[in-house]
Image: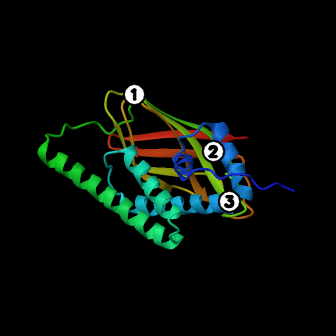
Amino acid sequence: MSTPSPQHYDPQEWSAYLDGELPAARRDAMRDHLRDCPPCAAILRSFEAVQRGAESLAQQPAPAQPQRRTRLVAIGAAMIAQGRSWRRWLLWLAAIVSAVILAGLAAALWRGATQPRQATPAVAMPKVQLTLDRVLITRYFVEPPSLEYDVTIHNGDARPLEVIRVIVSDPLGEKERPVAAALRVEAGQTLQRVFSRPIGEDARLQSGRYRILLETSDGRLVAEKVVP
């Protein structure tokens, strides 16, 4: 029988967990924490719901500003501390995320209209590396199981990498399923990220080829992992 965890993780840590910005050991510890902590699980589900809503609005790459996410986390934590309901907090947070995305899209369109654009070939960039580190199935007591793709994106180019859409496929019956949109990797940056999709309660990791595809403004990047 498991013992309830004595403390909760900060909402900002759950935001970093969802963005795949934590070391593997820290992420595993937080995943185990979810089993015995419904409040933290509720926070994570709330962030996931807001992220899904934001990604559905973001159809074009927008300038990445990590500070914005930090401000949103601070706003959410403050509203929780003031005793406001989860439903009201989610409505406010979703509205703020929508406004941030729309502002980013407007800025991108303005730059496109005022600056000359250089034609680039639609081929994968050799200086950009996409690695599918591992795939696994996670099962929480508080939410449906999910298939997770743990990936590393290294941008060795001299300009930012604009990802329009992220697509995964696997032997479990899902072919070409979009899981994220509007991702930006700065020049020289290495980004570790976890992408996931929900699966059935009885699903098991099967032998076969697991594939992740990044559609970028310059072409496509593909990484695969074969599970024996």
- What kind of element bears circle 3? loop
Q: Nearer the viewer, residue 138 or 7?
A: 7
Q: Are marks 3 and 1 in contact (CB under 8 Å)?
A: no
Q: In this figure, what is the number of numbered marks?
A: 3
Is residue 172 found left or right of 111 in the rendered image?
Answer: right
Which residue is painted at 55% across and 40% down in the image? 151
Which residue is pictured at 53% across the width and 46% down the height? 16
Q: Position of residue 174 (x, y in %)?
A: 59, 58
Disc 1 marks which amino acid? Gly
Vertical position of residue 114 compared to residue 190: above or below? below
Q: Nearer the viewer, residue 175 or 145?
A: 145
Q: Residue at x 22, y 50 (%)?
A: 107
- Mark 1 and mark 2 lie on one chain; the one further toward the N terminus is 1
Circle 1 residue: 188
Q: Sequence order check: which comes first, mark 2 or mark 3?
A: 3
Q: Quadrant of the N terminus?
A: bottom right
Cα gap from disc 1 to disc 2, whole angstroms: 29 Å
Q: Which residue: 64% across, 43% down?
A: 27
Residue tagged 3: 145
35 displayed left or right of 50 = right
Residue 43 seen in the figure: yes
Label 1's element? loop
User: x, y percentage for residue 90?
Assistant: 47, 67
Q: Give the structural element (helix, strand or loop) at label 2.
A: strand
Estimate the x, y position of residue 189 in percent, counting from the top left. Answer: 42, 31
Name the mark on residue 209: 2
Q: How far apart are the alpha carbons under marks 3 and 1?
A: 34 Å
Q: Residues within 10 Å of mark 3 (few under 14, many from 20)?
A: some
